[in-house]
């Protein structure tokens, strides 16, 4: 396919915009190094972007750099989107700014993420609720609905991000091939994007400013297992949008039936409900955290459950490392977030038992930085990226 002059210029606009979005504040010279576009081209595009209000000039001196060069920075409030996550029981929503942060209207409002408990709803019902949540959020932030440039919704299951279709989701029970993004666009009249919740989370983590990772793998272990891999900023999707889903790699071919229909997936040995069912053979516990309490943990049976869990988790890391050779693996989930010793134990187990010598120090294993909000942040960023990609064409 031959590119037209117009295509080339929109591509250059997008390159400049993206290099600022990922490296702000940044000089025109640094953009020239990243994009290989000439300095006059970079300057011309930057002027247009400033005129449009998408970026602003900041004084390098005021940032403590000591030089008087003007740097380019994203104007964070120029493009606001709504990022949402619906997991079949709870809808979380927040306004996301152009820097991929939860938008705060003042210093005291630092945590506003609306959370609504709703289950067993149809796609049409969810869209009505999303619409009212957008109104609630914009009212709270004293914004007008037209200040919102896009809406993103992260959902569990097989999501066709490009077409905006929910192919299949065991959690949602909506049947197959629901054109959710189009339905949402008809209601909200704005850019809409949907994606798998864990792929959205991986997107947020990978796009963190100053996060220097070529290949990031993300593992979410909780009531289910989700995982995703991002290579140079691109989420691996695979033929059926399930690339990287190592939770459903077979761990024991004679094992338990998994919710995916296969037998003996890693997921069967790592989800919270499995740990609870094991513990209930010995104790009357209700919540998975109780297994990790000191008074319970002194029991040999509790130690064995935890040891098995740690070992299986480390094996799961080994699977994703073997398949994708990432430089960073990020672990997510309530247990990982809330029990620091568990995270340490899993890292130690992986390094002592699974990692080859060459991987001992090469691979970073981290916890998520986003306190459970990475899916809604990641999808909000995707919505603004969609807006920016269209805007770059119109410059
Ligand atoms: Zn499975």
Image: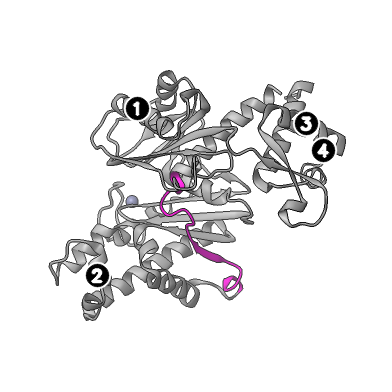
Query: For the residues carrying marks 4 and 1, which lies nearer the camera in this image?
Result: 1
Q: Is residue 348 above or below residue 241?
A: below
Q: Which residues are magenta?
A: 358-375
Say if mark 3 contacts mark 2, CB within 8 Å.
no
SS label for mark 2 = helix
Q: Which mark is residue 234?
A: none
In percent of width and height, residue 381 lies at 54, 39
Image check: 25 left or right of 87? Answer: right
**Quadrant in the picture for residue 240:** top left
Say if mark 4 contacts mark 1, CB within 8 Å.
no
Q: CA distance from mark 2 to mark 1?
A: 40 Å
In percent of width and height, residue 193 lies at 48, 31
In percent of width and height, residue 295 lies at 21, 78
Q: Earlier in the sequence, mark 4 or mark 3?
A: 4
Q: CA distance from mark 3 to mark 2?
A: 59 Å
Mark 2 — residue?
291
Q: Residue 32 or 359: which is nearer the viewer? A: 32
The quadrant of the rendering that contains the N terminus is top right
Say if mark 1 contacts mark 3, CB within 8 Å.
no
SS label for mark 1 = helix
Q: Is residue 88 above or below residue 252?
A: above
Mark 1 — residue?
132
Q: Earlier in the sequence, mark 4 or mark 1?
A: 4
Mark 4 sits near ligand 1, with its Cβ under 8 Å away: no
Mark 4 — residue?
37
Q: Residue at x 61, y 46 (%)?
A: 233
């Amino acid at each position: 396919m031959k590119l037209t002059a117009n295509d080339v210029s929109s591509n250059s606009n997008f390159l400049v915009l993206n290099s600022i979005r990922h490296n702000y504040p940044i000089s025109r010279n640094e953009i020239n190094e990243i994009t290989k576009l000439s300095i006059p081209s970079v300057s011309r595009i930057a002027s247009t972007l400033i005129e449009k209000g998408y970026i602003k000039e900041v004084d390098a001196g005021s940032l403590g750099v000591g030089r008087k060069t003007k740097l380019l920075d994203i104007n964070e409030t120029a493009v606001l989107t709504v990022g949402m996550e619906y997991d079949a029981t709870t809808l979380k929503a927040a306004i996301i700014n152009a820097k991929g942060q939860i938008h705060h209207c003042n210093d005291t409002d630092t945590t506003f993420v609306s959370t609504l408990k709703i289950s067993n709803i149809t796609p049409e019902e969810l869209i009505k609720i999303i619409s009212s949540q957008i109104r609630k959020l914009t009212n709270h932030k004293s914004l007008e609905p037209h200040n919102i440039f896009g809406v993103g919704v992260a959902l569990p299951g097989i999501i066709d991000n490009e077409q905006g279709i929910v192919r299949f989701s065991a959690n949602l029970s909506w049947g197959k091939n629901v054109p959710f993004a189009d339905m949402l666009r008809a209601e909200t009249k704005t850019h809409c994007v949907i994606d798998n919740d864990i792929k959205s989370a991986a997107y947020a983590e990978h796009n963190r400013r100053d996060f220097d990772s070529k290949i990031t793998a993300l593992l979410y272990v909780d009531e289910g297992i989700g995982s995703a891999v991002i290579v140079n900023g691109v989420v691996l999707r695979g033929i059926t949008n399930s690339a990287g889903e190592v939770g459903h790699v077979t761990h024991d071919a004679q094992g338990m039936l998994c919710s995916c229909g296969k037998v003996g997936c890693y997921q069967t040995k790592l989800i919270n409900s499995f740990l609870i069912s094991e513990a209930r053979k010995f104790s009357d516990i209700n919540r998975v955290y109780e297994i990790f309490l000191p008074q319970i943990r002194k029991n040999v049976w509790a130690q064995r459950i935890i040891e098995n869990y740690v070992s299986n988790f480390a094996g799961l890391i080994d699977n994703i490392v073997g398949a994708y050779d990432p430089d960073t693996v990020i672990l997510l989930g309530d247990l990982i977030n809330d029990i620091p010793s568990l995270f340490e134990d899993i890292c130690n187990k992986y390094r002592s038992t699974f990692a080859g010598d060459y991987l001992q120090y090469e691979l970073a294993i981290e916890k998520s930085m986003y306190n459970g909000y990475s899916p809604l942040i990641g999808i909000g960023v995707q919505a603004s990226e969609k807006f920016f990609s269209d805007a770059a064409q119109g410059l």
